[in-house]
Image (cartoon, helix red, strand yellow):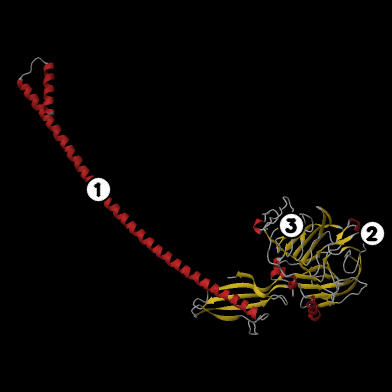
């Protein structure tokens, strides 16, 4: 097609360019043109063949390259699968080994715990036996059997009582498996008969905590509680509602506050679940209608304490009707004793008042300034071996103990309502250590008093018990002179009072006498490092402290 088109085109150009061309010339020209077209055709065909060859060669090369790449990918995939399988196997083996170790550790821990539970059971059946029934020093080793009766391990007990008269024992139990003896677990525990000093306050009467009172520790009263301070632990009453003796009006919740907004009166059904939430006052919470605590069962028999003092302690007899009792000043290694000859006179117009005794004047056993005027040195004494000091009279206490556990009792026998002894604290009575190394129990037959001439900032460390009276301060009117108002008292320990506690007096909402600020901090060491022969809340040994040593 292309050939004839070229021919026609040439003929046309020839006619246009000349008037005549002969046939021979025309044939020559056509032959020449045909040769040219043929040659072009051959050239184009050759180029096409070369292009096809190049494509074939390139395709051949690409296929080879692709085969090589696929081979590499297959090798890498096989390597990854092998690596993952090996890693998974290693992980599974490690995990199973780890789990086996943990299981063995748990078994060893269970064996060690069994040792603690065994010895707690032993003590409840054989109190004060600290040699595991052998009469020899430990450690005491017992085989351990699983539920199938197979002996799989053992526990070893190390036993040491804390102090004489405390009924508290340290126990260290080591549990180990026979199959893996190097895998052992150790538990340290303190077993003991819990003391009544587990409360910051334990009361058997209606009580009011005024503004400015801060309490760190649990509060319990068998009667009603008005609390207008800040409590950082539970505040509990055995009653659900009561009539607050400090004011008239409706029945109040047995634990209530007048901090604005004042608690509403309880509904007729007095459902404890309707008790308002007051987290601004009761930081942990409050409860009403809880179980009553028997004060008759927890107050210590002072006669027994007197006998212990006579046997292996320190005993001081009645100082005489013309004297007022004794003063004891604690020091690091011993204590000084003075006989109190006179107390500070009651100034003219000075009124002294107590909720239970009314108004009165200076006397030997009740209304008094309770402040020493003159005294006579008796002697310096070593601390008793059993930690018991007993005074058959009033006693003033002050000073500081160091690494000591002491109990001080005051009582007069035969007992008489008109002649019952008091303990007075006017100056700091302190510990040196606050880790349980020091503990002080103070038990008064009647009151524990803070007198007129007490320190402006007074600190008292110890567990205080007023057996038949109250812990606090008499009301002193402004006419009593300097000291009728004081700044702050801080008690670190526990307050246990048969009657209403209080170091401050208010009229309406106005502070009129006593300490403006009161801070009561519970010493939780009293749970298991309590003073010797201190009253107990239970006669059964329980676990007071439990921790894993290893």
Q: Between residues 137 and 119, which one lies in front from this camera angle?
A: 119
Q: Between residues 394 and 112, which one lies in front from this camera angle?
A: 394
Q: Give the quarter of the figure containing the N terminus.
A: top left
Q: Residues within 10 Å of mark 2 (few under 14, many from 20)?
A: few
Residue 500 in picture, x, y percent from top left: 79, 63
Badge count: 3
At mark 1, the secondary structure is helix
Q: Residues within 10 Å of mark 1 (few under 14, many from 20)?
A: few
Residue 351 in picture, x, y percent from top left: 90, 59
Q: Earlier in the sequence, mark 2 or mark 3?
A: 3
Horizontal placement of 23 versus 496: left or right?
left
Kindly identify which residue carries mark 2. Answer: 348
At mark 3, the secondary structure is loop
Q: Earlier in the sequence, mark 1 or mark 3?
A: 1
The answer to whether residue 34 is visible is yes
Q: Which mark is residue 61?
A: 1
Q: Which mark is residue 251?
A: 3
Which is more foreground, mark 1 or mark 3?
Answer: 3
Tell me, yes or no, whether the two marked residues, 2 and 3, touch with CB atoms within 8 Å: no
Rounded to the nearest angstrom, the CA distance separating label 1 from label 3 is: 104 Å
Q: Between residues 123 and 115, which one lies in front from this camera angle?
A: 123
Q: Residues within 10 Å of mark 3 (few under 14, many from 20)?
A: some
Rounded to the nearest angstrom, the CA distance separating label 2 from label 1 is: 126 Å
Q: Give the quarter of the figure containing the C terminus.
A: bottom right
């Amino acid at each position: 097609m292309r050939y004839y088109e070229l021919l026609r085109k040439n003929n046309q150009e020839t006619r246009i360019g000349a008037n005549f061309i002969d046939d021979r010339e025309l044939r020559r020209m056509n032959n020449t043109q045909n040769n040219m077209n043929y040659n072009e055709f051959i050239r184009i065909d050759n180029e096409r063949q070369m292009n096809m060859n190049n494509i074939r060669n390139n395709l051949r090369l690409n296929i080879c390259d692709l085969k090589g790449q696929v081979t590499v990918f297959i090798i890498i995939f096989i390597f990854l699968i092998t690596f993952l399988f090996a890693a998974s196997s290693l992980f599974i083996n490690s995990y199973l080994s780890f789990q086996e170790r943990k299981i063995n550790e748990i078994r060893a821990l269970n064996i060690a715990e069994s040792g603690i539970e065994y010895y707690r059971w032993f003590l409840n059946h054989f109190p004060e036996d600290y040699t595991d029934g052998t009469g020899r020093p430990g450690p005491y080793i017992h085989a351990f059997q699983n539920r199938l009766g197979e002996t799989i391990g053992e526990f070893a007990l190390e036993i040491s009582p804390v102090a004489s008269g405390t009924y508290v024992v340290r126990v260290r139990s080591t549990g180990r498996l026979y199959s893996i003896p190097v895998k052992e677990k150790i538990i340290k525990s303190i077993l003991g008969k819990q003391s009544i000093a587990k409360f910051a306050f334990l009361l058997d009467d209606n009580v009011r905590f005024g503004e400015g009172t801060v309490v760190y520790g649990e509060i319990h009263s068998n009667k009603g509680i008005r609390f207008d301070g800040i409590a950082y632990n539970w505040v509990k009453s055995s009653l659900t509602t009561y009539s607050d003796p400090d004011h008239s009006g409706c029945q109040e919740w047995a634990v209530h506050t007048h901090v604005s907004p004042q608690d509403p009166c309880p509904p007729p059904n007095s459902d404890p679940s309707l008790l308002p939430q007051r987290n601004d006052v009761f930081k942990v919470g409050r409860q009403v209608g809880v179980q009553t605590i028997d004060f008759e069962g927890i107050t210590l028999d002072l006669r027994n304490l007197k006998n212990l003092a006579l046997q292996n302690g320190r005993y001081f007899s009645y100082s005489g009707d013309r004297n007022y009792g004794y003063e004891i000043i604690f020091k690091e290694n011993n204590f000084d004793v003075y006989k109190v000859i006179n107390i500070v006179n009651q100034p003219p117009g000075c009124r002294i008042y107590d909720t239970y005794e009314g108004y009165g004047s200076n006397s030997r056993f009740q209304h008094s300034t309770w402040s020493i005027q003159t005294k006579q040195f008796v002697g310096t004494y070593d601390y008793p071996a059993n930690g018991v000091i007993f005074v058959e009279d009033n006693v003033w206490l002050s000073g500081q103990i160091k690494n000591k556990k002491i109990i001080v009792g005051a009582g007069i026998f035969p007992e008489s309502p008109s002649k019952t002894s008091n303990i007075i604290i006017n100056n700091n009575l302190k510990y040196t250590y606050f880790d349980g190394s020091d503990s002080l129990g103070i038990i008064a037959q009647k009151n524990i008093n803070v007198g007129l001439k007490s320190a402006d900032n007074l600190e008292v460390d110890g567990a205080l018990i007023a057996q038949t009276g109250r812990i606090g301060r008499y009301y002193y009117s402004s006419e009593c002179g300097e000291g009728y108002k004081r700044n702050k008292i801080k008690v670190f320990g526990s307050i246990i009072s048969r009657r209403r506690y209080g170091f401050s007096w208010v009229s309406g909402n106005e502070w009129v006498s006593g300490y403006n600020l009161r801070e009561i901090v519970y010493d939780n060491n009293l749970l298991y490092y309590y003073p010797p022969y201190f009253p107990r809340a239970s006669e059964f040994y329980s676990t007071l402290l439990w921790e894993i040593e290893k």
